Amino acid sequence: MTIASASASQYGDRAILQTSVDPLEKWPNPSENVYTIHLEHPEFTALCPRSGYPDFGTIVVDYCPGPWVVELKAFKLYINSFRDQRISHENVANQIADRLWNELQPQGLRVIGDYTRRGGVKTVITVKKGSCKEFEPYTPNVL
């Protein structure tokens, strides 16, 4: 058995792969009130599309739910599905925003990719869709 096939047989790897291709698990919105859900995933990682070196950061999602809210484990597994992808910072934030927008149908959505410095350069990508009036200002990580 190779390392790759052994890795693919692990429960976590199978769950991450499944979440990357299946619709996200979601729940009916339990309230008709206007409210904001704030999610942070501080251990995001993916690979630079040019060098293949790892990129690290925090993914922040704020949304005012419509008919659905995302199940938190599904969100975590989806964000972890980027770890072996060669993908730009900009594309990560836009892919996450598009998927959540399409699957959850929120009233408003903001996705922030707050990446750690690489080569001394700090990158923060923000994607907004719908009505984003309810969201608190975001303060980027210092490091």
Image (cartoon, rainbow, N blue to C red):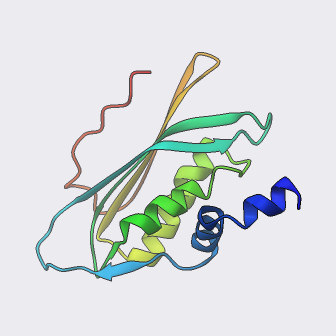
Please state if 72 lies on the left or on the right of 46 as rendered: left
Measured from the top left, where is residue 33 in percent x and y? 11, 73
Q: Quadrant of residue 47?
A: top right
Residue at image position (67%, 64%) is 10
Q: Is residue 27 above or below residue 53?
A: below
Measured from the top left, where is residue 93 in percent x and y? 52, 51
Of residues 49 and 25, which is closer to you in this image?
25
Residue at image position (16%, 64%) is 35
Q: Residue furthest left?
A: 33
Residue at image position (14%, 78%) is 31
Measured from the top left, where is residue 46 in percent x and y? 64, 45
Q: Residue furthest front?
A: 1
Please state if 96 lies on the left or on the right of 51 as rendered: left
Q: Residue furthest top?
A: 120
Figure disc tally: 0
Of residues 83 and 108, which is closer to you in this image?
83
Of residues 84 and 126, which is closer to you in this image?
84
Task: Classify the position of the N terminus by image quarter.
Answer: bottom right
Q: Quadrant of residue 7?
A: bottom right
Q: Is residue 141 above or below residue 61?
A: above
Task: Classify the position of the C terminus by image quarter.
Answer: top left
Residue at image position (30%, 38%) is 138
Measured from the top left, where is residue 58 in percent x and y? 45, 41
Please state if 126 lies on the left or on the right of 28 as rendered: right
